[in-house]
Image: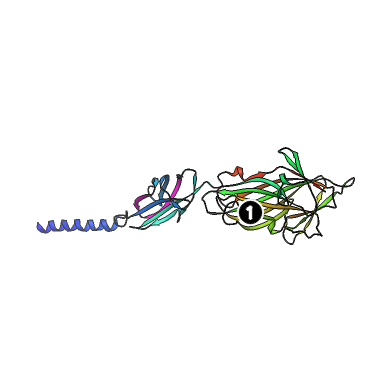
Amino acid sequence: MKKKIFSICLSVVVLVSLIVVLVPGCTGDGEQGTIEVKATLCDEAWEGDVDYTLTPASGSAVTGTNVTASFNVTAGEWTCEDVSGGPAGAYLESITPDPTQTLAADGTITFTLEFEEKQDAWIEFLTWTINGVPIEEWEGHWDYEPGLGYYAEVTWCDVIDVHYQQGVDGCQGREVTLNETDEIKIHYAWGEGDPPPEVVWVEVLNDDCAVVKEPHLEGPTPEKLGQVPSFEGKPIGPKDEKFYPLPWCNNVTLDVETSWELVKCLNYTKTINWLHIGECIEPPCEWCVLFNLLVPGPGFGFQLWPHACVELVDDVDVKPDNNCADGPPLYLQIV
């Protein structure tokens, strides 16, 4: 009888051992680790309400509603996604070090939600200038029509330029890259003779110092990464034709595309020396312009309209409707 009982007990022990060995998930499955979710705003630690989902490669997802938070979960691959909310007026820039990570048993991984303050590139027209003098102070000017345009008398070696105010709002002190397009439409309106010459000429100079940007307050000067002028939308390289006709009674677009690296939350004044009037022999001219306007002599007139746009490079702009600016027309009389 005792032998029979011993035999039954031994069979039970063997069966239990086989179940432990053969049934999957009885060892190794369910090993735990820790997921931490944190957040930053402009690289500074931030805590508050924010919704997100932690999704495993298999199994049930975990929902989070705030940071900093910690979750004990099964080891394996996890993805942080579906992020919403967070700091007021901010947007999610990235999840670091990676939105998908592998959690080891008894290990810890961290998802950091990196938020950026409202990032907004903007530009505003300031004034026309002649030889650096604001048009309102230029001796040979008057309002063509109050608030709608200016008339100015200019002569050989005068330089016509435009000033804009611009900047990028966002996390203070961060650098950002901008692409910028500036243009003027020029209309050859009148000239000496009956009829006047059918064309005058524009020479492309593209001096690098013709487009500059300076901060209003103390701060680093922006770095110009590139500058390419165009005539009627055609980019002009160093080896391309330099002289282009300006037909009578036609609108022609002159533009320049520049790219910049600058610091956010500083205001900048951008100066564009567009046109030099005529060839200068004596005294020598200080060339620092984009284009040279070659006219036969006095008595010629032109109308100019300015336009400028800025664009963030591969980045979010929360208010794109202030990315472009127009200014009042300028009517030039060569005397």
In the image, is 316 to the left or to the right of 51?
right
Instruction: Indicate yes or no whether the magenta region holds residue 93.
Output: no
The three-letter amino acid code for the residue at tag 1 is Lys
Q: How is the image coloured?
A: rainbow
Residue 175 in picture, x, y percent from top left = 55, 55
Judged from the image, the secondary structure of the residue bearing numbered disc 1 is strand
Q: Specify whether residue 81 is painted magenta.
A: yes
Q: Quick one: 215 or 40, which is closer to the camera? A: 215
Which of 93 and 333 lies nearest the eye of the viewer? 333
Residue occupying the far right of the picture: 194
Q: Is residue 73 left or right of 90 when viewed as pictured?
A: left
Categorize mark 1 by other alpha carbons within 10 Å: few (<14), some (14-19), many (20+): many
Relative image position of residue 252 (x, y in whole percent): 76, 48
Residue 287 picture location, percent across and down:
74, 58
Instruction: Return the residue found at the far bottom.
Output: 239
What residue does disc 1 label? Answer: 213
Position of residue 255 measured from the top left corner of the image (x, y, whole percent): 71, 51
Asked if residue 261 lies left or right of residue 257, the reply is left
Q: Which residues are magenta?
A: 68-83
Magenta residues: mostly which secondary structure? strand
